[in-house]
Amino acid sequence: MDEKLQALLTDIRRQLHATPTLPYDTSTESKKADGLIKLETQSYNYHLQLQDLYRALPTHFIEFNGVGNKEIVAFPTNQQDYLWKILAFSSPSSPYLDSDLLISRCVNVQKTRNIYNFNDYATKEIWQSQHLQSWARAEHPSLIVIQGNSQSIRRLEQFSLEITTQLRERYPTIFVLSEPTSRDYFLNQGELEVLRQLAIQALRLVSTPIPAGFLVDMFVRFQEASTSRDWFDILERIFQFTPSLFLVVDFSAMDSRINRATAWPFDFEQLITRLNSNASTRLWVMLLLSSHRISLWNLDAPVINKKLPIASWKTLGRSGQEDSHTALSSEAPSPPDNDLIMGTSEGEQSNQRREASPVRLVARSHVDNAERGADPMDISGVARSCSYLNTTTAESSSHAAPCSPSHRRDFAIAIFCALTLESDAVEPLFDQYWDMHAYGKSEGDMNTYSVGMVGRHNVVLVHMPGMGKGNAATAAANCRASFPGIRLALVVGICGGVPFMNNLTEIILGDVVISDGLVHYDFGRQFPDGFRRKETMLDNARKQPEEVRSFLSKLKGRRSRRILSERSNLHLNTLHQELGDCAAYPGTPQDRLFEPTYRHRHQLASMCADCQASDGGMGLACDTARALTCEDLGCDLGRLVPRQRHHQITSSIASYHPIIHFGTFASGDKVMKSGEHRDQIARQEDIIAFEMEGAGIWEIFPCVIIKGVCDYADSHKNKKWQDFAAATAAACMKAFLEDWALRARQ
């Protein structure tokens, strides 16, 4: 017996053992809540189908050597509808992503954004693009690439759902879309899983009889595929059984794995060319590249670079026949031809201070010597029938771009960041960027600013020269002089958290703390027997203004807190796509809370004479030990404090997501690195976090501190969580501002 056939029969036996052997469930395949179709969830009917196939396969098998081979014996019609499962389940560890549920989840994401007014990004300009219409109406197969950047992620996710939904209603379509579940799945499985999922979807759409030899050959290829080249070969063979097909891939579904797929646009273009030359399949491919971290490729088509120039014209690339060996430049492209400029007059261009539209399209039509004689596919009806997945009409969704402020006094929100990693997390969440040079600053102001829009608010981001309340106070005073219209200051960044609040609520790394009070914990008198904080009315931080306190009271409510959390999670996903691993969750094993009295020091006296080991871990610590990690020092993991939330995450009882807490900050110039002093101050002052800038800004502006917990303010603190904590704080900041009332300037 042929070795390939024997291998397939062996795997069918494995699948038989893994499927139900009793008819207790004759319904269609069951699906897990995670949207993964797995072998063990198949019904008894599939078990019976496997038995029939196992008996029939040897008699149908003839070595596969091409579609045109007249000797090939096809499977009976009643066996066609489940053959794709044989290949989908050929790898025990790789399930099939339910495409229908993926669409449903994407719809739910868009509905959520609509409810929370997230759909400010219209897709009408993409639908109206001449390139899109030409791609859809092309008689010959073609590739279209929609290139965006970090500011267009939501817009492209919305458009990819719209185009996929409409195409599926009319034509055979395979797709991979981006939403939280699919991003997590492909991040764990790898970028090649995207191609495997496309291959399985294509198999499900095959309507012509499948030869037995083809199934055997595909099984071996599925087993042996280890590179993208292998999977493109598999796709090419499957596509030969589909006369026409649309393919849509949103690259952001691969999350940080996207950098390993930089050659795919070129591979898809070559695939279209080969299929076209064989006159076997008409394949239309759409690739959506919604992150500027993607490299450029040597496509046989004009490609708009990822770096967008400061300009007022919008989209949309240039089409045309160019030399197939034209090298791509990494410089910013020239403005497009006049007939491609959309919706901006020359007068308007001179008044706008904003970046070019972050969405660009490039198209390539492959015209070969094969004459089709078939009617071209036309999605003009698709473009007309698809409004938007929110309740807004196309006209209202495609509102004009917001105008930049005319004067510095028109900025109402100031955001203060002491560290570069904090501002790096805030800036990608700007919805518009204004030119700071157009506004200037007051004489003597030494601050450096970035200006733009977050939600409906014009904001100024203050890049502080360093940490501490002194730097913060100076920066705030200068900011008030240059931007007299500021009515709310947000201090955004990282902080040390108190692991257990007075009500025993747990705070873990990555959580966010929003201030409803502030204590100058290091302002007082040092006596021989200890430190005494000054607690007179004049020495305490003032109450937050009534407007701030009433808004925080609303946010603490159950419904508003839920909305704030959901919005924050959406913005955190955006940052993850933009910043990659810098905004990735480090993992529960990296979140370590030691007993307050267990100090970070050399644990053996023989390792360091200065670190005393005779007192159960409560001795002195040398400077060398303070600079080393817990792994270097061999800190005893048996002294870790267990937390219920960690147990729920590791036991899969609950998934990780940052929780937003409201409470009092302790602010001062000291870096808290003592678990004992942390808990002592927390009990005395009822504080839940430590930070160093809020006290300098609190008395100058109405102020709210929004910071992510990056450590537990003990001697074991390190910098592993700083990037992620800054990202969670920035995401919460944007969610906060999206609900903060816009007040007209008097």
Image: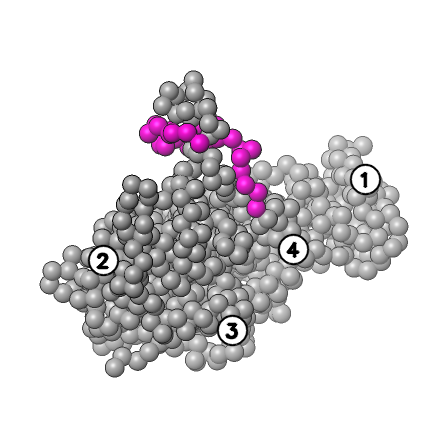
The range drawn in magenta is 618-643
Q: Who's the residue at 41% across and 66% down the image?
A: 736
Relative horizontal placement of residue 549, taking residue 382 as reference (left or right): left
Amino acid at dot 3: Ile
Q: Who's the residue at 20% across and 62% down the image?
A: 477
How far apart are the alpha carbons under marks 1 and 2?
A: 73 Å
Amino acid at dot 4: Asp
The label shown at residue 473 is 2
Q: Residues within 10 Å of mark 1 (few under 14, many from 20)?
A: few
How far apart are the alpha carbons under marks 2 and 4?
A: 49 Å
Secondary structure state at the residue bearing disc 1: helix
How far apart are the alpha carbons under marks 1 and 4?
A: 27 Å
Amino acid at dot 2: Ala
- Front of the two marks 1 and 4: 4
- Front of the two marks 3 and 2: 2
Please name the residue that numbered disc 4 is placed on: 34
In magenta stretch: residue 297 = no
Rendered-image quadrant of the C terminus: bottom left
In magenta stretch: residue 635 = yes
Please name the residue that numbered disc 1 is placed on: 13
Please name the residue that numbered disc 3 is placed on: 115
